[in-house]
Image (spheres, rainbow, N blue to C red):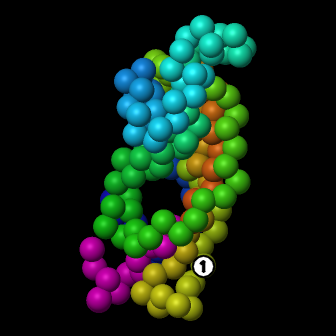
């Protein structure tokens, strides 16, 4: 189901499917970004830092959480821009083999004077692992098309 700006309601909630974070994901992200911190690549170093093993990059987890939002296929065709990211908090480590899903809630929506064909929707995302621990929280601001004869997706 495709959602337009008018379709979002304050407090509305969405839940994604799960996705496993793999060792390969972490390695590829490290290579892609150049963030080769030993916490993400070396078991013994991560253990000496108090973790049970290597941990996923926080930004990798955030990226996957945003991807899980898009996997819901609610705005793929109505989203015009990713307008902002705020209040990001990494609550718990994510390890290879962890499965996460997101729970998203609409915080607010408003008109945009600069874009009469669209509005701003603010979402709170929570990344939850299979142990029901919140590993990530973030707020997204998305510019979403409005319904109308010139805006049909």
Please give the name of the residue rendered at 33% of the width and 61% of the height, measured from the top-left corner.
Answer: 76
In the picture shown, does residue 72 fall above or below 128? Answer: below
The residue range painted magenta reads: 142-153
Q: Quadrant of the C terminus?
A: bottom left
Please give the name of the residue rendered at 48% of the width and 88% of the height, measured from the top-left corner.
Answer: 115
Q: Quadrant of the N terminus?
A: bottom left
Asked whether residue 152 is drawn in magenta, I would say yes
**Element class at badge 1:** strand
Q: Which residue is mark 1?
A: 110
Quadrant assignment, res 84: bottom right
**Nearer-the-camera pick, 85 or 38:** 38
Residue 147 lies, in percent from the top left, at: 38, 81
Residue 98 lies, in percent from the top left, at: 50, 22
Q: Is residue 45 visible?
A: yes
Does residue 57 appear left or right of residue 137 in this picture? left
In the picture shown, does residue 26 fall above or below 47? Answer: below
Please give the name of the residue rendered at 52% of the width and 36% of the height, measured from the top-left corner.
Answer: 35
Please give the name of the residue rendered at 48% of the width and 66% of the height, measured from the top-left corner.
Answer: 82
Does residue 137 appear left or right of residue 30 in this picture? right
Magenta region's main secondary structure? loop
Residue 134 lies, in percent from the top left, at: 65, 33
Quadrant assignment, res 81: bottom left
In the picture shown, does residue 108 fall above or below 131? Answer: below
In the picture shown, does residue 103 fall above or below 145? Answer: above
């Amino acid at each position: 189901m495709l959602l337009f700006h008018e379709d979002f309601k304050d407090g509305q909630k969405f839940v994604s499917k799960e996705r496993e974070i793999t060792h390969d994901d972490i390695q590829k992200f490290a290579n892609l970004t150049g963030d080769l911190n030993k916490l993400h690549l070396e078991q013994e170093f991560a253990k000496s830092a108090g973790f049970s093993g290597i941990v996923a990059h926080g930004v990798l987890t955030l990226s996957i959480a945003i991807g899980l939002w898009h996997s819901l296929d609610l705005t793929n065709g109505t989203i015009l821009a990713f307008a902002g990211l705020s209040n990001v908090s990494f609550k718990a480590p994510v390890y290879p083999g962890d499965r996460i899903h997101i729970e998203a809630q609409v915080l607010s929506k408003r008109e945009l004077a600069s874009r009469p064909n669209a509005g701003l929707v603010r979402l709170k995302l929570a990344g939850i692992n299979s142990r029901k621990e919140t590993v990530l929280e973030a707020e997204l601001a998305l510019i979403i098309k409005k319904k109308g004869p010139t805006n049909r997706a």
